[in-house]
């Protein structure tokens, strides 16, 4: 998912580390998409887990206990992994393009500030469904949009190319 922020003069950004001078340009917030499960889906999953737990307990009544213990353990690990993933922070990047400057900040909070003139956008197809975007400068190459899917990367590529031409 990507969000587009304008930067009119005097307006505060959500993240000051991507701020750039002037009133022209664009700020893109690129972040990983995660669809939240609605309450109905959670209820259905809870019912299914209950049924699977009941089905895994039935063999214990006949003296077979190793299979049900394994099934219950794997279900508990799956639930813990889903909870951990839902609570973990999303991968996110910031890209600001203004007249004369390009600024990028990745998920590890590493900020890169480049002059806009030698910067170009390079697109590489690393497979049938894998598109990679790079900001290429004379002395540095940075991959952007790592957390986006292929369709979003194509849309962001058009946006970035247009703004790099204007910068």
Image (cartoon, rainbow, N blue to C red):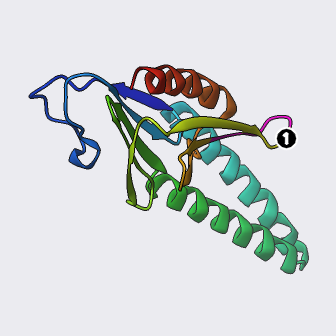
Horizontally, is 52 left or right of 104 in the view? right
Residue at the spot of label 1: 127
Q: Residue at x 44, y 23 (%)?
A: 163
Task: Look at 60% across and 28% down and name the residue there.
Answer: 152
> Looking at the image, which residue sits at the far left?
10
**Is residue 129 in the magenta section?**
yes
x, y percent for residue 164: 46, 27
Q: Residues within 10 Å of mark 1 (few under 14, many from 20)?
A: few
Up the image or down, 123 lies above or below 86; here it is above
Q: Secondary structure at mark 1?
A: loop
Residue 137 position, x and y percent, is 53, 47
Q: Which residues are magenta?
A: 128-133
Examine the rendered structure and indicate whether residue 47 appears above or below residue 67: above
Q: Is residue 161 left or right of residue 72?
A: left
Tell me where residue 110 sits by quadrant: bottom left
In this orientation, which residue lies closer to the viewer: 41 or 9? 9
Q: What residue appears at the point 26 percent right and 49 percent down from the top-left corner? A: 17
């Amino acid at each position: 998912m990507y969000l587009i922020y304008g930067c009119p003069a005097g307006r505060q950004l959500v993240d000051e580390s991507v701020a750039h001078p002037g009133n022209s340009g664009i700020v893109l917030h690129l972040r990983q998409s995660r669809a939240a499960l609605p309450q109905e889906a959670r209820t259905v999953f809870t019912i299914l887990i209950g049924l699977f737990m009941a089905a895994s307990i039935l063999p214990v009544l006949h003296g077979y206990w190793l299979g049900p213990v394994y099934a219950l353990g794997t279900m508990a690990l799956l639930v813990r992994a889903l909870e951990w993933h839902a609570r973990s922070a999303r991968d996110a990047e910031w890209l600001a393009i203004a007249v004369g400057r390009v600024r990028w900040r990745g998920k590890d909070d590493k900020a890169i500030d480049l002059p806009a003139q030698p910067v170009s956008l390079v697109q590489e197809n690393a497979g049938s469904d894998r598109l990679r975007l790079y900001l290429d400068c004379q002395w540095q190459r940075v991959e952007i949009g790592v957390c986006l899917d292929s369709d979003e990367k194509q849309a962001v590529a058009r946006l970035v190319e247009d703004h790099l031409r204007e910068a």
